[in-house]
Amino acid sequence: MADTKSMQIENKQVDKKKTKSHRITFGIIYLVLAAFIWIVFVNGTDTSILTTFNMTPGGSSAYMDDWIFPTASTLSTLAFICAIAGAYQIIRGFGKFTNGILALVAGIFIFSFLSWASSGGSINLAGLLRVTVVRAVPLTLGAMAGMLCERSGTVNIAIEGMMLTSAFVSTVIASLTNLWIGMLAGVLTGGLIAWIHGVLTIKYKVDHTISGTVINIFATGITSFLSSKFLQKTDYQYLNEPGMFPQIDIPVLSKIPFVGPILFSHNMYVYAMFLLVPFLTVMLFSTRWGLRLRSVGEHPKAADTLGINVIKTRYMAVILGGMMAGFAGTYFTLGSSGRFDELLTAGRGFIALAAMLFGNYHPVGAMGAGLLFGFFDSLSAKASILKVPIPSDFLGMMPYLATIVVLAGVVGRSQAPAAAGKSYDKESL
Amino acid sequence: MENQKQTQNKPSGIAVFFDELSKSSGMVTFLAILTGILIAGLLVALTTVEVYDAFSISFWSGIKEALRTAWNTYSSLFIGAFGDPKKIAAAFQGGDGLEIRRAINPFFESLVQTTPFIFGGLSVALGFRVGLFNIGAEGQLFIGAMTSVYAGYAITGLPAYIHIPLALLAGAAGGAAWGFVPGYLKAKTGAHEVIITIMMNYIAFKLSDFMLRGPMKDPNEYTPKTPWIQESAQLTRLFPDTIRFHIGFFIALGVAYFVYWLLFKTTWGFELRTVGSNPNGARYAGINTTKATVVAMSLAGSLAGLAGANEVLGLNYRLVPSFTSGYGFDSIALALLGKNHPLGVVLSALLFGFLRNGSRQMQLKSGVPIDIVSILQALILTFIAAPAIIRSIYRLKKPDHEEETIKVGSWGGN
Amino acid sequence: MAPLLELRGITKRFPGVLANDHIDLTLEKGEIHALLGENGAGKTTLMNILYGLYSQDEGDIFVNGNKVTINEPTDAIKAGIGMVHQHFMLIPVFTVTENIMLGEEYVKAGGFLDRKKAAAKITEISDKYNLNVNPDAYVRDLPVGTQQRVEIIKILFREAEILIMDEPSAVLTPQEVDELFKIMRVLVDQGKSIIFITHKLREVMECADRITVIRGGKVIGSTTPKEADTKKLATMMVGRDVQLKIKKTKSDPKETVLNVENLRVMNSQQHLAVDDISFNVRAGEVLGIAGVQGNGQTELVRALTGLLPPTEGKIEILGQDTPQEKPRFITELGSAHIPEDRQKDGLILAFPVADNLILNTYFHEPFSKGITLQFDEIANSGNALVEKFDIRTPSVNTPVSNLSGGNQQKVIVAREFSRPIKLLIASQPTRGLDVGSIEYIHKRLMAKREEGCAILLVSTELDEIIQLSDRIAVMYRGKILDILDAQDATKEVLGLLMAGIKPSDEMKSQAKHEEQIILT
């Protein structure tokens, strides 16, 4: 009788063609970027021109000297590094460092752009990055909300609606009581709406995207309705004065020049993000809870046969996700604007969804994507002070274009949980 | 005797009728709308201070006040949508043309509101039929408005019978281009159209912001606005002043018929529906699914683009920033309510058009914000999407066949 | 003493179907009890009830003489029952350890997973029963046979006493099946008890201690392999005399219809699924492609029908080069395709029967003129085909989804056979069908062969291949190892080929000899 091992039908003949073509594509992209830096940025810049980066955000006490460097020669060096990376990528490839190098090249390109755009003048780099972190908060939190849902098999396109509603509720409740109770009310509101999404998708097996769309329409309607009925009337102004969570400077850390004001001088939402990202990572990938949650998103039938309650687990994940979205929603009012205005989330929920996909369903990836999107966001707000006339609208488009590029698989493809978007029907095989 | 026996065995005609009625999806649609209206009415009552004041007097006066509030709201909505019957009667008796037009204006204004809904609903419905969720009607509409406005003001010296179709076509082409991108990406790379179209929406907003402040800005204006379109590009109005009703409505009906014919009477439609129902099966049958996806999304985009063109060519005559107001999401609601059938879309567009128009009057008269219509839409849509809710509330019988539901699925992988 | 497990009067109704009709069944400790029945007899439903995936409408379950209520798989696990499902319940992106401990996780303080401890236990079980599984491997990287052993460990990990195995041999080579039977024997020797579900007589005779036959949701009878004879079992299973062998005339192959040379095809994961294959099929003959599922047959068929472009090689149909052609071009040449997964590929379930019957001819006259469809013609032709092919449907306007599996397959056969075809590519044409439908399809296939159609038959059912084919090619890891004349092909030789071993000529003739001895 033949040996069992020899019978194993292993399909290990992985063809290297695809990875090779990917490698070369990346290499060419790096070379093109290098050429772009060279031709557009360096060539148009006189060698005597300097770039000044302010390293202290406005109003911060942790001072650091401005960073001044000659634009053209610095950019030439960076273009050279890009070119080398590209050449090496084509010839040998970076193996497991591929993604790291990709991030490095992208960083170099953005830095070059900034240096060129502010050449001959100055730009407040520290301020830019500080705002980046702030703008990343709702996106990262929203992305993690979507992740909790989708990792358990429920697609949640209603993050926008959940954020909007919780922003409204938190404003009213915080105005009547205090910030913390308001925040809590917002979180619970998010959970409540997520529960409705759960009932529609899990119990009634409504298509997840349609259920999410309905919730978004409803959230837009109800918040605008109540807002114009009450919050916008002078008689009820007291309902729209929730106040804001104060900025907390972390002792010692906030005094570090440059880094301190960017990372450690914010209100509690930023710190919550910094804590929730590793927390959720550990929870999802190293605990029983996370294993079970992911199992119902990958193969609910398998989980069911092992005695895991698919329905309960999905409800739990969806509601927790909703609470996360609710928390993100309260950021807009209690952490950012201090009042509720109609449609104040302005599509951040959808961008959060994009950040989730961009970050490949991983909390760390989500924060990376959130920071990237936040950067473009904060840059487009500053576009007018740049020396070079790049319309701010085009900078504002970058997150959306980047998402399309990622989704189209130009730069790797995100791997969705296998059962995401499929309602579970126990008595069908 | 024998007759009697038969009637005993067979349920009576009326019972059969009610049985069938109870199973039919039309009944669910009707009850969904009714339930939505009831709940929205309740919401209005619950958010009215006077109702609470009345409750503090006595329970019954509270109930009475609540009913009165709901009645006032809906009756002002009705009058806003159809016109005030008394005024109409008086105007006709008076015989003054202007007065008559003013009195019947609400009805025609509702039709004016209906028109973009028809285009938008058709756009989403066509997508659904081909298995695509076009959540980007909003962006396509914006781009369509932009391109048609450009054709409207930049091209001069054409007679109306050439200029109008040309400007409409420009709108359709703009929308089609915006729909083509997600369609192409979906077909070639498997990128899910839901996220792509949402992203395309935002790109459209940014792009139009840029265009309105830059290349397309009317130099004589301080705020970002395009120039006025040529008179030859304006959609013909059918009545003298105050009534804005224009031929756009009939164009929309014609397009709806065209979509119906295309989907259900032609081999192309057969191919599109096959792809929508089972793309693997379509591939097996030799249908080019890539082409079908791209064509469908482009067509859907062009329909949404026509909605935008219709607005700028028929009503505004120029483009201003953020001129759309959630047509994209409304269109999804419409398509679902209309069961993705062109006739259903026209009917639900009429419903929404009259609701939207009536709600303005309602806001003025009874102080109920216009957003109640969005809430109403969401409620109706929930019940349409989950017919089991309506069936259990009203104890309806289960249908013989499984109800057709729409599946969009996940968007991460393929 | 009470039996280890007893089912009494189990009844389960699905809308319109009585899936289980008062079934009684007992399982003694340390036995392999085979549950024999054809597809749709109700075996799997019964086991799903026992495992808590469905709940019965009537009847009771006793373990060790005590009545137990099983509403959830958890209840079954608690009662010491485990199940290896026909479709494996494994999560590809999880490791073996994660898959096995899911639901019964080893945790450290604070709810953190203790993967090491679980892996140690898995290794222990694996060694004890000689299962040879690496706990750290990802399931997606494992071959099917190993995945099945992971499923078995999953049950042993929960210290179950009763193992239910639902059609475990379907995905294995004959040699792997032998291996599995050995493992099952080891398990039983160590005190476990097994319910073994199958529709294959040979397997029952080989490994069961006791046999219970189920038909139409009812228990027909019980016996042991010693007392039973195959013919009688077959009759019990099907409910009438079965013609085990189909009469086949000598083939008279004519001109070459399909010619394949050096074909290479990548699957969707960019693995080389078809590796340098050459063969031809001639008019009036059936070439069978045997092999364990997943050895490239699917990709081969998809390449031949234009659904998957090959990376290299030549495909000639009636002298036409087709490797980069679209499906439409190939069907128009006169090639028909009965797809492997009829619901996924072959039908539009939501469409009416009539529309499905014109699925690849709708653009021809008389079904359409210009671009407008001719509905009268479509309905007429539909009605005619429904009659000719005995499709049981209320009307041609009924959605295909409402038809039974056998009738759905008939819709496909009717559609494909109503065109003038020169080549038929049939992939798993009888999978999941009842015996009546299988016989019908087989007869139709043979009739097409008589008409001079070239047929490429792909099947994982060896019996089907041997019965119908004139020549048999065996695929293993994307290659055709050998092409045999049907007279020379014995199960033993085919089995070795399916496992990737090329038997010597000596072995072939010896196997042939042995088989003759067994048969006489």
Image: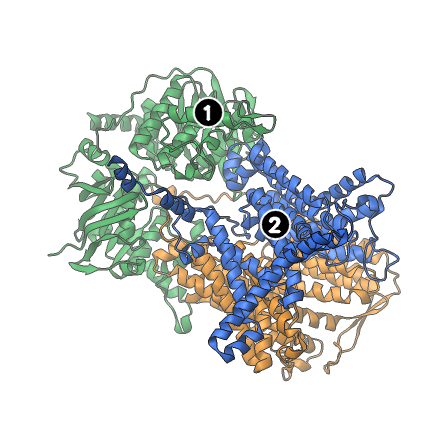
Chain colours: A orange, B blue, C green
Check residue C380 in the rendering and tell me which mark sits there, or answer none: 1
Q: Vertically, is C301 above or below A206?
A: above
> Can residue C471 be spotted in the picture?
no
Q: Indicate the position of residue C447 as horizontal and vertical percent values.
A: 37, 20
> At which x and y percent is residue A232?
66, 73
User: Which residue is pictured at 38% across the width and 46% down the height?
Assistant: B19
Q: Is residue C308 above or below residue B397?
A: above
At a point 65% along the width and 40% down the height, the residue shown is B255
Residue B172 percent location from the top left of the image: 71, 43
Query: What amino acid is labelled 2 in the image?
Result: Ala
Q: Quadrant of residue C452?
A: top left
- The quarter holding residue B275 reads top right
Q: Which residue is mark 2?
A: B349
Q: Chain of mark 2?
A: B
Asked whether residue B59 is in view, the answer is yes
Which secondary structure lies at badge 2?
A: helix
Q: What residue type is disc 1 on?
A: Asn
